[in-house]
Amino acid sequence: MLFNTYHFIFAFLPVTLLVFFALGSRGKMDLAMGWLVLASLFFYGFWNLAYVGLIVLSLLANFGFGQALIKEGTPEGKRKALLCLSAGLNIGLLVYYKYANFFVDNLNRLAVSNIHLERIVLPLAISFFTFQQIAFVVDAYQRKAQEPRFLPYCLFVTFFPQLIAGPIVYHGEMIPQFLQKDRFKFRMDDFSIGLTIFILGLFKKVIIADEVAAYASATFAGADNGLTLTMFEAWTASLSYTMQLYFDFSGYSDMAIGLARMFGIKLPMNFNSPYKATSIVEFWRRWHMTLSRFLRDYLYIPLGGNRQGPTRRQVNLFLTMLLGGMWHGAGWTFIAWGGLHGCYLMINHYWRSWRKPYREAQPVGRFANLAYWALTLIAVMISWVFFRATSFDGAMAILKGMFGLNGLSLPGGLASTLGSLETATAGWITFDGIQVNPFPIGITAAAWALAASLIAFLGPNVCQIMHRYEPAFETYPGELKRGTANWLTWSPRLVWAVLVAVLGFWTLANLTRVSEFLYFQF
């Protein structure tokens, strides 16, 4: 079930809220919690009922492993064996559903064999609920987790606002909230804050992300089919996808945070204006923050982190990002994306080490910061090409256009004023217009991408707009900047009620063009 559908907004959500608070207000916490688990499983099974059994088996197995690992008196050898078995089963499940076809296809190419494996449909959310439970089992082994009750654990795994695409949550930040009695009683302030965040996130998805998506999708499809793209076309497509992905995924995260808050539950921040970052290191503290936190805590640090010298640190960074790329999808383009960000981070850390002695004597100025920001954004946009393209040929077609190898074609309407440039550049600049069949790409596409960019570069994010009311807890403490202008800070006043209502009605009127969230495929 999608958040951006009428049946979710006007049927599933109100019924779930009403029954939950009706039970909770009578002190029936376990019944209310059980209802929310069942509603979450219905939400998950609405897409494919067959996979409800998979998530139930997964949570039963991991709950059992966690109980055994937490139990006092279990021999250390047995505890290590249980940890290895649980990790192996979780990773094996992920590998089978996500990578089996990829491995078989590549084996057939390398060995010129003909091994046949039926196409395996990827269950929704398998990466997210598997990661969350791996974290729980590891914490249980390290005795960082307390023995949970069964119902709160089930809700931790299945809680529908963040089940499908995150944020990735830890048991220690969710289960204690589910055990607080006041969470089960309706609070108007939580509901109004949550509804506002949900509407703002829905607006980002439906009005901004889905609008720029049309331009990005058409151009990338053309590149995958062998279309030659000029610089204007390629950069417009890259910028459009850069904005589509941000507003789509951050919009989903905002909706998840808002939905959880309606139930009195706080989720962690997942985005903190990542396109304002002035380095790749900072970018990864702002983009998909709960994933970068998980990769840090359960992959980078176990690999050795920065404890074994600078060279090993760089290797660990690269491996972490490479595996992070593989987590996003079973394809060489995702591996290339992860490897590229691994290289970016290595270069960034080398630069910081070299620059460290000069930092105090020569503080970074405004223009240098602007240059760092532009360089970071361009590097990220180049990497998104691999993330979006369905093949290396398609990615190369986009990148060739971006680097000007195919010339520059401007909209025909500019020929009357700039036509002399075509002769002066020996045909490198032309005025043929910009057409990517079957969708025209031109000034309108560039205008939408530019408008979305201005919001991402200059505007506050939703958590900043709502910061007075602690909409979410900070994934990285101290990361949420409080510098939002007062007139852009939400408060329960008539002007904000009218503005949010207008955005809500505008968004609801456009739900007829329903589209899935990009991160559902991961």
Image (cartoon, grey):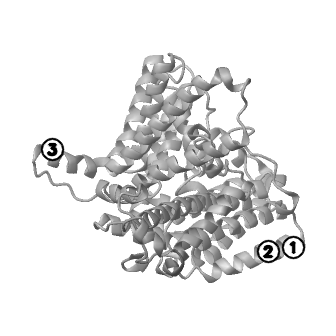
Using the image, determine if residue 68 lies above or below residue 323.
above
Q: Position of residue 44 (x, y in %)?
A: 50, 62
Distance from disc 1 to disc 2, alpha carbons, whole Å, reads 6 Å
Instruction: Give the image location of residue 198, x and y in percent.
Output: 69, 65
Residue drawn 51% across and 35% down? 345
- Report whether 185 appears left or right of 168: right
* Image: 339 above or below 460: above
Name the residue type under label 2: Leu
Q: Which residue is mark 3?
A: 110
Q: Amino acid at mark 1?
A: Val
Q: Secondary structure at mark 1?
A: helix
Mark 2 Cα shell of 10 Å, populated few (<14), some (14-19), many (≥20):
few
- In the depicted view, which residue is nearer to us: 84 or 193? 193
Residue at the spot 56% in from the left edge and 25% down from the top edge: 142
Q: Which residue is mark 1?
A: 495
Contact between labelled residues 2 and 1, with CB atoms less than 8 Å apart:
yes
